[in-house]
Image (tube, rainbow, N blue to C red):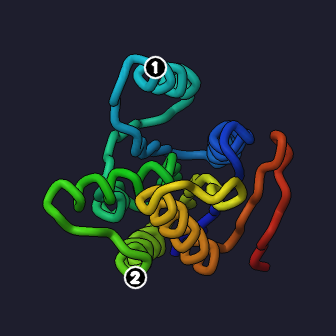
């Protein structure tokens, strides 16, 4: 059964770098699951920099915007997995559903999270899940942004509840929030 580690914090708090460093301390095969689609030149440049940071460090990368559980189930046992990030995953799920006239609710995201956790638990390795803590800022001025914030918060709660460890990054400093013996 996999160890699940949630790494959370604000934007540019050092979450991704911290999770990658910790994952690279574990011997064996490594899988990076990237959830960010290329939507503009600036995002393409960010993705390029993230790829370069993993280059030559033993990572296989799979770009998957919505079916995280499926990718983890197919990844094989004994592998260290890093999903970066759940917050973009939520964005992608909301976008996909809204294209067909559906709405992602907190109840629906709970089901997606439970499926993701179940897939992680089926693995024999360590799974790092990176997520932004988006609810620490101002209240958004529109319904969609408020729903996104609420869904992201619910996702983080569900994943944290199931995780063996939760690490909060503040100004690049990791603060252990939860550690199972």
Horizontal and vertical percent for residue 42?
Answer: 46, 20
Mark 2: few, some, or many residues within 10 Å (few <14, many ≥20)?
A: few
Horizontal and vertical percent for residue 59?
Answer: 48, 35
Nearer to us in this view, 130 or 75: 130
Q: Is residue 118 visible?
A: no
Taking the spot 79% from the left edge, 79% from the top edge, the residue there is 181
Judged from the image, the secondary structure of the residue bearing numbered disc 1 is helix
Quadrant housing residue 70: bottom left
Nearer to us in this view, 84 or 148: 148
Q: Which mark is residue 107?
A: 2
Nearer to us in this view, 154 or 175: 154
For marks 1 and 2, the one nearer the N-term is 1
Callout count: 2
Whether tag 1 and tag 2 are in contact, CB under 8 A, the answer is no
Mark 1: few, some, or many residues within 10 Å (few <14, many ≥20)?
A: few
- Residue 108 lies, with reference to residue 66, above or below; the image says below
Taking the spot 54% from the left edge, 54% from the top edge, the residue there is 141
Taking the spot 51% from the left edge, 62% from the top edge, the residue there is 146
Does residue 139 appear to the left or right of 172 in the view shown?
A: left
Taking the spot 40% from the left edge, 73% from the top edge, the residue there is 109
- Residue under label 1: 42
Does residue 158 appear to the left or right of 113 in the view shown?
A: right
Q: Which mark is residue 129?
A: none
Horizontal and vertical percent for residue 45?
Answer: 46, 18
Quadrant housing residue 134: bottom right
């Amino acid at each position: 059964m996999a160890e699940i580690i949630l790494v959370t914090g604000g934007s540019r708090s050092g979450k991704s770098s911290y999770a990658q460093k910790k994952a690279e301390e574990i011997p064996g095969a490594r899988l990076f699951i990237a959830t960010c689609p290329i939507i503009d030149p600036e995002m393409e440049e960010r993705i390029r920099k993230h790829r370069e940071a993993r280059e030559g460090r033993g990572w296989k990368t799979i770009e998957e915007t919505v079916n995280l559980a499926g990718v983890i189930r197919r990844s094989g046992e004994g592998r260290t997995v890093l999903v970066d990030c759940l917050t973009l995953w939520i964005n992608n799920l909301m976008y996909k559903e809204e294209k067909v006239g559906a709405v992602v609710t907190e109840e629906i995201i709970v089901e997606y999270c439970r499926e993701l956790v179940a897939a992680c638990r089926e693995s024999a390795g360590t799974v790092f899940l990176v997520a932004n803590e988006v609810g620490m800022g101002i209240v958004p001025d529109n319904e969609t942004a408020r729903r996104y914030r609420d869904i992201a918060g619910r996702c983080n709660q569900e994943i944290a509840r199931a995780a063996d460890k939760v690490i909060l990054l503040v100004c690049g400093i990791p603060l252990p929030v939860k550690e199972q013996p």
